[in-house]
Image: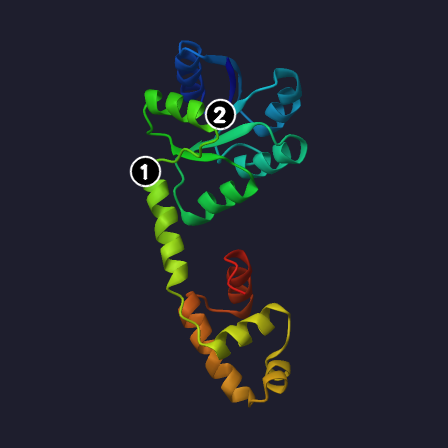
Amino acid sequence: MIRVIIVEDDKEIRESLSVFLDESEGLKFAGSFADCETALKNIPELLPDVILMDISLPGMNGIECVKKIREKDEAIDIIMLTVHKNDEMIFDSLCSGACGYLMKNTSPSEIIEAIKEVRNGGSPMSTEIARRIVTSFRAKKTIDFTSREHEVLALLCKGLSYKSIADKIFVSIETVHFHIKNIYRKLHVNSKSQAVAKAIKEKLV
């Protein structure tokens, strides 16, 4: 029997989810909570196998909650169930430890299948989410840095100033600015901090 809890602040969604979970063979509805803080207090007692987690919640958001759950328990499978489909939230959720990502318009039968799939080691995703992830990886592969641009970006990530980079690779500071302008264009960013953050997050260096 798969024990499932829900963390969702919309009462109507919470109640409808709880009904079809409890009526589904092989599943046991173990509890629901309107906020992460209350859920975190009750998880040790309820011992859920799977958590359906919203992202936008009062107080702590769902992504932060996933991180806190993961600090204490690696065995619980967490599926994000949300309306958000921007790349940042998808990747932040998965990097924090979520095992799946479903949109709230997912049918009850698909949610049930996703719960069973995640317990069998799968990573259930709504079709549009899976496509966004594939597209994102494809986009990363098309970042065609020259060897010099890659070198400059790596030195930026190490915290070197433009002058220090110029001295390090034996070019003028004007040449460094030229490379950095191309790096910004290829990364679709407008500042050094954005370039460094994106390079580190996407493991480009």
Residue 100 is tagged as: none
Q: Nearer the viewer, residue 144 or 36?
A: 144
Amino acid at the residue labelled 2: Arg
Q: Secondary structure at mark 2?
A: helix
Label 2: how many Cα within 10 Å (few below 14, some 14–19, many 20+) = some
Which residue is under mark 2?
A: 119
Nearest to viewer (mark 1 / mark 2): 2
Tags 1 and 2 touching, CB below 8 Å = no
- Identify the residue shown where x is 64% and y is 75%: 160
- Identify the residue shown where x is 44% and y is 72%: 145
Q: Work out whether mark 1 precedes mark 2 in sequence or the reverse, and give the earlier one.
A: 2
Quadrant in which residue 146 is drawn: bottom left
Q: Secondary structure at mark 1?
A: helix
Which residue is under mark 1?
A: 127
Amino acid at the residue labelled 1: Thr
- Indicate whether 133 appears above or below 158: above
Q: Seen in the image, is 128 located left or right of residue 78? A: left
Q: Looking at the image, can residue 8 be seen?
A: no
Q: Seen in the image, is 59 located left or right of residue 143? A: right
Question: In the rendered image, which quarter contains the C terminus?
Answer: bottom right
The residues tagged by marks 1 and 2 sit, at their Cα atoms, a distance apart of 19 Å
Q: Residue 46: x and y, percent?
A: 61, 16
Q: Looking at the image, can residue 195 be seen?
A: yes
- Indicate whether 173 appears above or below 118: below
Q: Residue 59: x and y, percent?
A: 58, 34
Residue lying at the far front of the rendered structure: 120
